[in-house]
């Protein structure tokens, strides 16, 4: 009888402990962090934030989460304080009651919302997660300590973010449109003003300055000489778009990532939305982390490193865009060759040289290669939600190389620009890998 009671008591205690520990398993699930990043990705898409501004959002949100991890696991990770430009304050060690996995998620959400969004954009998601943690057995004192620690780390990253010149660039003058041969002007169908002409004034995370990696100037504008490099590049775009194969269309569509597209059919106009280039690469991080069976800490580390590389790559690229102010193929072809010609993809509202997507894709590929290794074959399922079939790649670099063809097939970039962009994006990603000592 006594033996039976002991067995029953042990079973009861095991069940009670198992129930009380359930929140820990949930909070430490790397897929929950991936889901949280995707939630932010959806909010970015829904609120029409430009790819450039979105990169800033992903940067601060992921760095906040990473700093929680580094503070909780100093045996495995180094704080980015003293490594990222302007970030000097190292978070304190978390108290014994802090669940640092959930603290990382809370810090991510707080920065993701606060950096560029109105208050409350992620509150429903956070409230839902908090309620779930409580149902899974998280004690009130653990939740309280976890929130307080997340807030401490968030405050550090928030203070850091406020000194990056973003607020100042909101009031700087608009881009001066000068309609001269070879110079960028707004393109159909929306004819929007140039996006973020002062982004080179944003503080880089790792680069010494926006002009640390200045690419060679683009080929001189020369529409009269059919043997000039510019003329050949321009005609190559025109001919490619007019003779696209189904495979080339798939490549262009897969890497489109325009964000907001204006659809015009006669007198009917409507907007369709997709995530932007940095959002696409955030998805790829999640796909790679899941395939590699990475733990929570490694997953956060991968997102943070990739977000840092993408952020600096945009600054490098935008510095050149508004230095060269290069005309888009659509502008040149319409004016000098065929007024009715249209690219396969919609031309975004900023100068052509260099290519933003090619630059940030190459940078992201270097960061991810450093985390998960080269020849990491994977299938990218990111575009399925938009009805676009998957594509498979032999490595992250393979994906970045395909991307530069995508912008050419789309008719929105000269291929020379994409090649140069890939080279310089790789330089940014390599710098991030070399300078940051994140994992011990």
Image: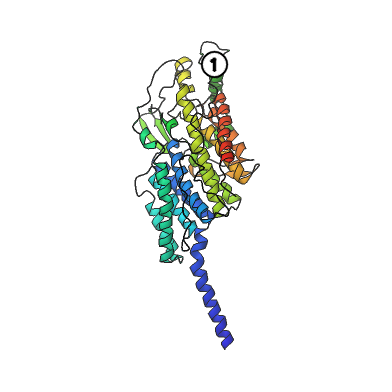
Q: Which residue is mark 1?
A: 231
Left or right: residue 269 versus residue 84 is: left
Q: Is residue 394 above or below residue 20?
A: above
Q: Nearer the viewer, residue 226 or 91?
A: 91
Identify the image quadrant of the N terminus. Answer: bottom right
Please state the horizontal and vertical placement of residue 184, each as a whole percent of the image: 44, 22
Please state the horizontal and vertical placement of residue 176, each as a whole percent of the image: 37, 22
Q: Residues within 10 Å of mark 1 (few under 14, many from 20)?
A: some
Q: Nearer the viewer, residue 148 or 411?
A: 148
Q: Is residue 251 above or below residue 324?
A: below
Residue at x-position 50% and y-position 41%: 84
- Disc 1 is placed on an element classified as helix
Please state the horizontal and vertical placement of residue 293, each as a whole percent of the image: 60, 53
Residue at x-position 45% and y-position 15%: 181
The image shows a total of numbered marks equal to 1
Q: Is residue 296 above or below residue 164?
A: below
Q: Nearer the viewer, residue 211 or 15?
A: 211
Toward the bottom, the furthest residue is 1
**Would you say residue 387 is visible in this rendering?**
no
Q: Is residue 124 above or below residue 364?
A: below
**Would you say residue 81 is visible in this rendering?**
yes
């Amino acid at each position: 009888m006594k033996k039976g009671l002991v067995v029953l008591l042990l079973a009861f205690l095991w069940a009670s402990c198992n129930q009380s520990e359930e929140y820990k398993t949930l909070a430490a699930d790397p897929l929950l962090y991936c889901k949280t990043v995707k939630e932010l990705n959806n909010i970015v898409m829904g609120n029409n934030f430009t790819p450039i501004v979105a990169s800033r959002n992903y940067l601060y949100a992921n760095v906040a989460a990473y700093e929680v991890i580094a503070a909780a696991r100093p045996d495995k990770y180094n704080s980015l304080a003293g490594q990222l430009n302007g970030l000097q304050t190292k978070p304190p060690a978390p108290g014994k009651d802090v669940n640092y996995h959930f603290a990382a998620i809370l810090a991510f959400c707080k920065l993701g919302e606060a950096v560029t969004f109105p208050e409350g954009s992620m509150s429903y998601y956070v409230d839902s997660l908090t309620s779930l943690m409580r149902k899974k057995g998280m004690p009130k004192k653990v939740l309280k300590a976890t929130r307080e620690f997340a807030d401490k780390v968030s405050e550090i990253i928030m203070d850091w973010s406020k000194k990056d010149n973003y607020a100042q660039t909101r009031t700087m003058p608009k881009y001066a449109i000068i309609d001269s041969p070879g110079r960028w002007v707004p393109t159909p169908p929306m004819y929007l003003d140039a996006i973020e002409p002062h982004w080179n004034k944003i503080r880089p995370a790792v680069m010494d300055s926006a002009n640390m990696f200045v690419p060679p100037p683009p080929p001189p504008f020369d529409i009269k000489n059919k043997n000039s490099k510019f003329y050949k590049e321009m005609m190559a775009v025109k001919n490619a778009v007019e003779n696209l194969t189904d495979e080339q269309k798939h490549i262009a569509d897969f890497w489109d990532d325009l964000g907001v597209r204006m659809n015009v059919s006669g007198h009917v106009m409507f907007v369709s939305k997709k995530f932007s280039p940095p959002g696409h690469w955030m998805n790829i991080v999640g796909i790679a982390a899941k395939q590699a069976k990475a733990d929570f800490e490694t997953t956060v580390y991968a997102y943070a490193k990739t977000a840092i590389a993408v952020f600096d790559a945009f600054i490098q690229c935008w510095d050149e865009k508004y230095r060269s102010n290069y005309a888009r193929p659509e502008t040149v072809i319409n004016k000098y060759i065929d007024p009715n010609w249209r690219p396969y993809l919609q031309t975004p509202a900023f100068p052509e040289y260099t290519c933003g997507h090619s630059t940030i894709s190459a940078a992201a590929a270097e960061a991810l290669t450093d985390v998960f290794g080269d020849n990491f074959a994977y299938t990218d399922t990111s575009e399925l939600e938009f009805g676009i079939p998957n594509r498979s790649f032999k490595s992250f670099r393979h994906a970045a190389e395909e991307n530069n063809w995508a912008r050419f097939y789309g008719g929105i970039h000269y291929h020379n620009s994409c090649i140069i962009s890939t080279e310089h994006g790789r330089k940014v990603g390599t710098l991030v890998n070399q300078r940051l000592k994140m994992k011990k």
